[in-house]
Amino acid sequence: MAARDAFLSRFPEQRIEIDGRSWGLIDTGIPGGETAMTDGPCFLFLPGTLGRADVFFRQIEAMAPHMRVIAVSYPESGGVVEWAADLTELMERLRVGQTAVLGSSLGGYLAQYFAAERPDLVTHLFAANTLHSVEGIDQRPPYSSDLWNAPIAELRAGFAAGMNAWRAAHPEHAEMVDFLLAEADGRIPEPEMRARLDAIKTGPVLPPLSNTHDTATVIEASDDPLIPPPMRAAVRERNAPAPAFRFLWGGHFPYLLRPDLYTSLLLARLGVATLSPDWTKSEDGTFQA
């Protein structure tokens, strides 16, 4: 994708070693170029299984003038517990005192765990297109496979089948499908892909959260093929009293399919902008657009 490549020319992914694990890192820096630790706003993006740090490039570009924005790509080993500890170390290394955190899918599970374990570090939790529990997931493909030894082609074929099914149903989203197929087909290296899948399969039980209405937000989509309605409801319940915002279309990747509305929602929940009038409150108390 040309727009993503142009973004990477400005904010290339770097590598940072934490506790023997090599993380990918995009860091826009503090607006104005300051380098000391600051109480100014910071935002951390945690991708899902099919995204590197730059998968949020449209959000990062739009938010960077307002705050420091950090995004990561996962290492080749470890899981949710180890990665949460690494994020604590990462913030210390980058001299970040506190940050808002958005995680999507796998990243949303990690974000919920991190916010529960270190509420002192998280100013706002965005739990997006994610799950509330991994109970029973080891019984479903691809997680039912031996993720460290199954042929990588089989694991990648599963992603390809899902994405191509989405393309068949939504040909207008072909560009996004091609973007994500490139991620699944090798832009995410094999060991990283296996680690991401295993992180969900072996994920810990989520500790209780200390959310308030103003310090957490749930994001979901009505047509998300991977997060069914009962799971969405459970995520809302776990994150209560956080308000929930439901994209009426956007699938599992509304940040790619509806980037402007997605970004404006983040900025509105952080108090940087006003909430778009596209959002209306539904009978179940969620906001929809």
Image: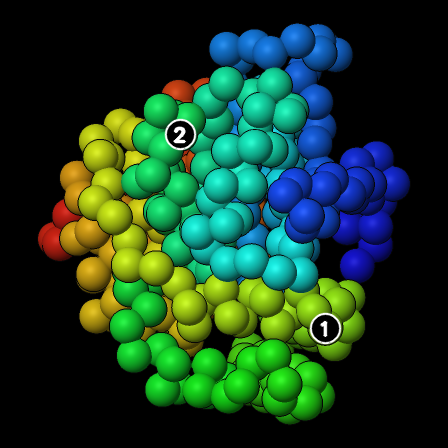
Picture coordinates of residue 53, whole percent (x, y)? 66, 48
Q: Nearer the viewer, residue 238 or 121?
A: 121
Question: Alpha-carbon distance for marks 1 and 2?
Answer: 31 Å
Name the residue: 56% across, 10% down: 38
Name which quarter of the figure residue 45 lies in.
Answer: top right
Picture coordinates of residue 140, whole percent (x, y)? 39, 86
Quadrant where the N terminus lies? bottom right
Q: Is residue 194 left or right of residue 135?
A: right
Q: Nearer the viewer, residue 187 or 149?
A: 149
Name the residue: 56% across, 58% down: 78
Circle 2 residue: 122
Q: Earlier in the sequence, mark 1 or mark 2?
A: 2
The kind of secondary structure element at disc 1 is: helix
Circle 1 residue: 190
Tell me if residue 81 comes above or below residue 198 in the rendering.
above
The kind of secondary structure element at disc 2 is: strand
Colour convention of the picture: rainbow
Q: What's the residue type where badge 2 is placed? A: Val
Picture coordinates of residue 201, whole percent (x, y)? 43, 72
Picture coordinates of residue 15, whole percent (x, y)? 77, 43
Residue 73 visible, this angle = yes
Furthest toward the right, the residue is: 9
